[in-house]
């Protein structure tokens, strides 16, 4: 039976991914900090579901979870590092220093900690797919979201490095760069979010990208155009356009 391990599965995109793959009759490993939310979700899913509570920023805890999952279900076919946090930050604020560190630890090291315990077993088997959830926010620095943009830029480059490192092993690496998805993280945004996706649509798009063995996937399709212009826009033009852009609230 195919098995899939998903972090940040208690709500939002992670929950939608769990439901999307549950329809395929796979064995699921679901991880989040809120175990009670996972248990409630598991009761609504079909097939084998193994729930785990851990912080993706804790490498020892993530290794223990991975070993437990492999003993119970086997080496996963797909690992989706979805857990992440988004919050507005200002470098000038001393109070935001801890928030910067938490965002980087969760969004960047959380992916490393999720993948690392599974890679050796996947390489020995000669197959598997590692999926990292990034963001188009990683293409350029978004004002008021320096920590988040930096974390996603780091994720994009890290996943590219990992993809090349594993290219001869049979283990694939897929980078997912969504635009806006309607979740608790985006519900607090006090600004218009173009091409806002429902979590279910986003999960379906990710599944299709995995099935097609893609390396890089921006969604929805409209955001691919936005992403292109973000990349090529001259700095002087970008600075003028974004300096008055609305900011994400600074709370977490």
Image (tube, rainbow, N blue to C red):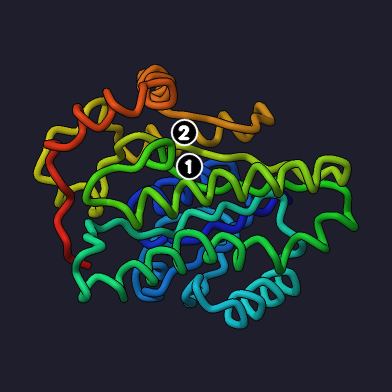
Query: Circle 1 sits on which residue?
Result: 20
Indicate whether 72 appears above or below 7: below
Would residue 198 appear left or right of 9 to someone viewing this image? left
| Residue nearer the viewer, 24 or 181 | 181
Q: Which mark is residue 204?
A: 2
Q: Quadrant of residue 163?
A: top right
Residue at x 44%, y 69% (from the top left corner): 32
Q: Residues within 10 Å of mark 2 (few under 14, many from 20)?
A: some
Between marks 1 and 2, how big is the CA–CA gap? 7 Å
> Are dots 1 and 2 in contact, CB under 8 Å?
yes
The percent position of residue 122, horizontal first and vertical second, equals 81, 56
Would residue 251 appear left or right of 52 to someone viewing this image? left
Q: Residues within 10 Å of mark 1 (few under 14, many from 20)?
A: some
| Disc 1, SS | helix
The percent position of residue 100, horizontal first and vertical second, equals 34, 67
The percent position of residue 203, horizontal first and vertical second, equals 44, 39
| Disc 2, SS | helix
């Amino acid at each position: 039976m195919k098995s899939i391990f998903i972090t940040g599965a208690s709500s939002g995109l992670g929950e939608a991914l769990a439901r999307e793959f549950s329809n395929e009759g796979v064995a699921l490993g679901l991880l989040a900090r809120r175990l009670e939310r996972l248990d409630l979700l598991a009761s609504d899913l079909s097939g084998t579901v193994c729930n785990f509570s851990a912080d993706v920023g804790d490498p020892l805890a993530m290794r223990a979870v991975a070993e437990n999952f492999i003993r119970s279900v086997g080496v996963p076919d797909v690992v989706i590092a979805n857990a992440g946090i988004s919050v507005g930050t200002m470098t000038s604020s001393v109070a935001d220093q801890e928030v910067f560190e938490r965002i980087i630890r969760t969004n960047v090291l959380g992916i490393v900690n999720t993948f690392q315990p599974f890679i050796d077993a996947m390489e020995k088997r000669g197959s598997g797919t590692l999926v990292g959830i990034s963001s188009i926010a990683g293409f350029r620095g978004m004002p008021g979201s320096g920590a988040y943009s930096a974390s996603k830029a780091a994720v994009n480059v890290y996943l590219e490095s990992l993809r090349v490192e594993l290219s001869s092993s049979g283990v694939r690496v897929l980078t997912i760069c969504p635009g806006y998805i309607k979740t608790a993280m985006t519900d607090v945004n006090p600004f218009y979010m173009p091409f806002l996706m429902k979590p279910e649509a986003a999960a379906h798009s990710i599944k299709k990208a995995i099935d097609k063995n893609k390396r890089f996937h921006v969604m929805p399709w409209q955001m691919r155009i936005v992403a292109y212009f973000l990349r090529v826009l001259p700095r002087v033009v970008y600075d003028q356009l974004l300096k008055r852009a609305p900011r994400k609230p600074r709370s977490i």
